[in-house]
Image: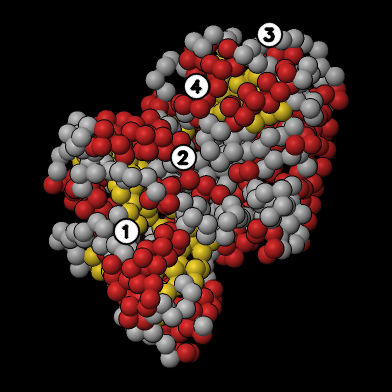
């Protein structure tokens, strides 16, 4: 097995799916000859040609709208938005077209497309280049919203997303694009969309997170184990919509304490929905108010304050202690 | 056209300031002093300056992600800009805008814009305000060849004609939308013919010739101020660097930039013209070069010494009061 970065693992998924299925097409700004702004599509154009790895003019709305049309008529487009913050031009096409096609045709049309978007902070940029607004998509019925947390699950989930008959928005954390490697088997692997995973076992506290924040949560869990003798169960959601809340409820029934960590803005964020679900499913098991460690309700700031915006290991540890000490 | 000496000195000084600001930005980025993604505009100075020398502080411009040159040409403080792109508390936007969102409303600079195709709709609005309020002010949007394919730009072109807005659409065709060549991405013969199809006068100009830009734009400015509506200009220009600092530019021929620097450098052309005509002496240009170099040195020095924003700034300015 090769040790791959997340960039390389996603590239592997694209390459293998394109080899296997001629209807899979990759498209976006600079994805072809140039190999993508983060080099995710590197080498694909040479291998599969310009018809299947298509450079497009700079027009996000047209890219996603066209992908929707391709998907209803027999192809499986995988579009790239260069940054999730650039996808707002395309939001209309996703929300008003792709997401509704199955519903409005009473199931006769399906939209097997993927829109890949690098998201989140950690690249010392600001605003659109660092945002984490997955709730726009998670809030939209008809879209699936997947956010992997590392190379191996990114590869497996992308394969599943490409094969999924519904439109999938696939967020890739820039913070973890190249920050660590994992063994990724050459042999095909998939993971079911809509299933979370337990990233660490523990009996004292449940921490739910996803995407790039998973690494920080695991680090915080080690700190809590070492310094406080507390064992944290970490749940990595992997898919935000449809949300796999059953394992979270089960874990909370065991630990009685829950912290939610995400870099998305706090208000109306994924944490709010999770708390509502836990209130419905495990309210009587809670021994402390659920804590949220999140980005703030502000525009993602420039680098001097970027790390202050993102949940840090220290903030996660502090949030955990608040939940534990209540 | 006859040019006053002061005018020529100002034009040269501003273009040179942009050139050295950009070249120094690359150096400071590589030293780790400028974070994030930075897009420099060296090579395109004559477009920014040839356009903005027609404008007053109450005229507005809307810029692109490649906005340093437009900002300097519109009169933004160079030291404040350097502080801003280094994210410092005393920067032009208090370190909140960075390279891609520099704005200074006192100078009529509506802002650089990370969103490609962001400026034209905003500039339509500024133009409509001026028109509604009975002012003679005009708006100029800068858009790249890549941006010219965004839906927002095409919508704004139409609306400007419908509402007869005092808005000049300046399309800077530097031949690349990020890493994709214009010959591939632009379906029409050129941007001008596409813009013209919306029903406005559309012209083309050599964007590496300051005098050509200045003179071509003059008619559009007059038309806008006199209530004649919008104009679009396509300036054929060059990008001496990659899409962003650090771009390996694998999509360009190896000696392409070298050739462009030799044959299509707007500063070289300007120098040749003004000395050839006897309008300015080489020694005068050299004095300006030195003064600009000193200014950029000072800007970097002051920016590096400037404080970082206070952590409390994280949550300010989202609303009137947070």
The secondary structure type at the circle numbered 1 is loop
Location of mark 1 (residue): A243
Residue drawn at x 79%, y 27% as measured from the top left: B58
Labels 2 and 1 within one chain: yes
Labels 2 and 4 within one chain: no
What is the x, y in percent for residue B79?
A: 77, 48
Residue drawn at x 24%, y 50% as measured from the top left: A161
Q: Chain of mark 3?
A: B
Residue drawn at x 39%, y 20% as measured from the top left: B187
Q: Which quadrant holds residue B167?
A: top right
Q: CA distance from mark 2 to mark 1?
A: 23 Å
Location of mark 4 (residue): B154
Location of mark 2 (residue): A88
Location of mark 3 (residue): B228
Q: Chain of mark 2?
A: A
In contact (CB < 8 Å): disc 2 and disc 4: no
What is the x, y in percent for residue B278?
A: 81, 19
- Mark 1 nearby-residue class (10 Å; few <14, some 14–19, many ≥20): many
Q: Chain of mark 4?
A: B
How many discs appear?
4
Picture layout, residue B46 above or below residue A158: above
Q: Which quadrant holds residue B292?
A: top right
Colour option used: secondary structure
Q: CA distance from mark 4 to mark 1?
A: 39 Å
């Amino acid at each position: 097995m090769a040790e791959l970065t997340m960039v390389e693992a996603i590239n592997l998924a694209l390459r293998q799916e394109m080899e296997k299925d001629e209807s899979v097409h990759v498209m976006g700004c600079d994805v072809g000859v140039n190999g993508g702004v983060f080099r995710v599509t590197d080498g694909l154009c040479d291998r599969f040609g310009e018809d299947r790895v298509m450079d497009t003019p700079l027009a996000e709305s047209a890219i996603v709208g066209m992908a929707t049309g391709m998907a209803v008529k027999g192809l499986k487009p995988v579009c790239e938005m260069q940054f999730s913050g650039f996808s707002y031009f395309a939001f209309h096409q996703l929300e008003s077209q792709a997401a509704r096609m199955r519903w409005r045709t009473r199931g006769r049309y399906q939209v097997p497309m993927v829109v890949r978007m690098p998201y989140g902070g950690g690249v010392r940029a600001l605003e659109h280049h660092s945002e984490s607004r997955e709730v726009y998509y998670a809030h939209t019925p008809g879209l699936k919203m997947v956010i992997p947390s590392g190379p191996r699950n990114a590869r497996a989930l992308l394969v599943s997303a490409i094969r999924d008959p519904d439109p999938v928005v696939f967020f890739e954390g820039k913070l973890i694009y190249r920050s660590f490697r994992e063994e990724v088997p050459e042999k095909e692997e998939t993971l079911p969309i809509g299933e979370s995973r337990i990233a660490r076992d523990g009996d004292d506290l449940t921490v739910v997170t996803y995407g790039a924040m998973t690494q920080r949560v695991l680090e915080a869990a080690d700190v809590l184990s070492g310094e406080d003798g507390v064992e944290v169960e970490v749940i990595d959601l992997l898919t935000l919509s449809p949300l796999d809340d059953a394992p979270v409820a089960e874990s909370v029934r065991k630990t009685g304490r829950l912290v939610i960590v995400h870099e998305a803005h706090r208000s109306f964020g994924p944490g709010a929905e999770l708390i509502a679900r836990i209130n419905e499913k495990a309210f009587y098991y809670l021994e402390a108010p659920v804590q949220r460690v999140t980005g703030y309700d502000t525009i993602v700031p420039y680098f001097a304050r970027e790390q202050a915006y993102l949940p840090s290991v220290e903030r996660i540890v502090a949030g955990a202690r608040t939940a534990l000490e209540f | 056209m006859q040019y006053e000496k002061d005018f020529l000195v100002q034009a040269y000084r501003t273009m040179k300031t942009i050139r050295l600001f950009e070249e120094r930005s690359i150096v400071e980025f590589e030293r780790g002093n400028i974070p994030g993604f930075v897009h420099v505009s060296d090579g395109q100075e004559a477009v920014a300056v040839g356009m903005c020398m027609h404008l007053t502080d109450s005229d507005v411009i809307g810029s692109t992600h490649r906005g340093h040159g437009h900002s300097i040409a519109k009169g933004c403080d160079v030291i404040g800009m350097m502080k801003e792109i280094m994210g410092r508390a005393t920067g032009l936007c208090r370190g909140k805008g960075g390279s891609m969102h520099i704005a200074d409303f006192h100078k009529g600079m509506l802002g650089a814009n990370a969103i490609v195709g962001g400026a034209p709709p905003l500039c339509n609005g500024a133009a409509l305000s001026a028109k509604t309020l009975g002012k003679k002010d005009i708006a100029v949007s800068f858009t790249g060849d890549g941006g010219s394919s965004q839906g927002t730009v095409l919508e704004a072109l139409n609306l400007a004609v419908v509402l007869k807005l005092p808005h000049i659409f300046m399309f800077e065709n530097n031949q690349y939308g990020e890493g994709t060549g214009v010959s591939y991405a632009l379906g029409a013969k050129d941007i001008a013919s596409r813009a013209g199809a919306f029903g406005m006068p559309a012209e083309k100009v050599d964007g590496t010739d300051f005098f050509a830009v200045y003179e071509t734009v003059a008619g559009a400015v007059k038309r806008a101020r006199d209530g004649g509506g919008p104009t679009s200009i396509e300036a054929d220009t060059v990008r001496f660097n990659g899409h962003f600092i650090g771009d390996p530019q694998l999509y360009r021929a190896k000696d392409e930039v070298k050739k462009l620097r030799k044959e299509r450098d707007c500063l070289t052309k300007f120098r040749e013209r003004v000395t050839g005509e006897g309008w300015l002496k080489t020694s005068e240009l050299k004095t300006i070069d030195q003064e600009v170099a000193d200014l950029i040195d000072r800007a970097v020095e002051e920016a590096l010494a400037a404080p970082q924003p206070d952590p409390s700034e994280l949550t300010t300015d989202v609303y009137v009061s947070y």
